[in-house]
């Protein structure tokens, strides 16, 4: 019960924070999409896979769900990852967006302070930690590996594209920052 409850709190907190942060800093862009509940088909399938693995293992191999150091490590990753992501969004404020801009929005600034001083992609780093942490919290060995691989693949495409657009938007500032 503790694993499932912690997961539900983590999942609910993540989506609520996405919505509330958007509401605080980009209220003109606020919509149902701001919850990120409909992020992608892959995200939805991953969430269903995590739930299915958890409940199947609870039913057929409950020993896999004993609390221990991996559960504690998962909680730490969830909290640190979620904190990093929210801090990144707050640090960017109105300059944060869930979708990568392909043209520079008016008034957009390159953010290099706060958590961005230490991590070039703290929102992505935080999400990665949070996502794999949720699978440790659930005690899902299969989804832990799948989430890590899927996240890596997603960011291996997204980060180079985002960095290319940032170099185009900020030809002097971004290379100096990166």
Image (cartoon, grey):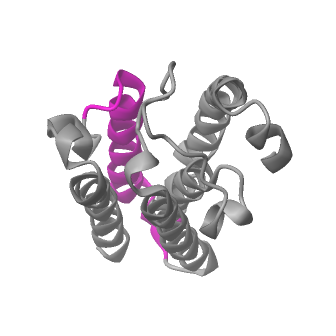
Q: Residue at x 36, y 26 (%)?
A: 40
Residue 32 counted in the magenta span? no
Q: Quadrant of residue 133?
A: bottom right
Q: Position of residue 45 (x, y in %)?
A: 36, 30
In this view of the protein, which residue sits in the foreground, 72 or 176?
176
Q: Quadrant of the N terminus?
A: bottom left
Residue 62 counted in the magenta span? yes
Furthest toward the left, the residue is 32
**Main SS of the magenta segment?**
helix
Q: Residue at x 50, y 78 (%)?
A: 67
Taking the image as shown, residue 14 lies to the left or right of residue 95, namely left
Furthest toward the front, the residue is 107
Taking the image as shown, residue 144 lies to the left or right of residue 21, namely right
Taking the image as shown, residue 130 lies to the left or right of residue 35, namely right
Q: Quadrant of the C terminus?
A: top right
Q: Position of residue 35 (x, y in %)?
A: 23, 45
Q: Which residues are magenta?
A: 38-66
Q: Residue at x 27, y 48 (%)?
A: 26
In this view of the protein, which residue sits in the foreground, 80 or 100?
100
Q: Quadrant of residue 62?
A: bottom left
Taking the image as shown, residue 80 lies to the left or right of residue 30, namely right
In this view of the protein, which residue sits in the foreground, 117 or 141?
117
Q: Is residue 63 visible?
A: no
Q: Quadrant of residue 99?
A: top left
Q: Position of residue 116 (x, y in %)?
A: 66, 60
Furthest toward the top, the residue is 102
Q: Residue at x 33, y 55 (%)?
A: 59
- The answer to whether 141 is drawn above or below residue 66 in the figure is above
């Amino acid at each position: 019960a503790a694993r499932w409850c912690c997961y539900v709190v983590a999942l609910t907190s993540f989506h609520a924070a996405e919505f509330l942060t958007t509401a605080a800093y980009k209220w003109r862009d606020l919509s149902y999409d701001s919850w990120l509940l409909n992020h992608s088909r892959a995200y939805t399938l991953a969430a269903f896979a995590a739930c299915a693995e958890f409940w199947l293992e609870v039913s057929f191999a409950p020993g896999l769900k004993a609390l221990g150091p991996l559960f504690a490590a998962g909680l730490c990753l969830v909290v640190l990852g979620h904190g990093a992501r929210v801090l990144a969004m707050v640090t960017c404020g109105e300059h944060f967006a869930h979708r990568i801009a392909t043209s520079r929005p008016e008034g957009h600034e390159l953010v290099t302070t706060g958590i961005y001083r230490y991590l070039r992609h703290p929102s992505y780093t935080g999400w990665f930690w949070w996502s794999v942490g949720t699978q440790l919290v659930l005690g899902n060995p299969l989804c832990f590996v799948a989430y890590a691989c899927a996240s890596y693949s997603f960011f291996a495409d997204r980060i180079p594209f985002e960095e290319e657009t940032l170099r185009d938007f900020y030809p002097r500032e971004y290379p100096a920052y990166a």
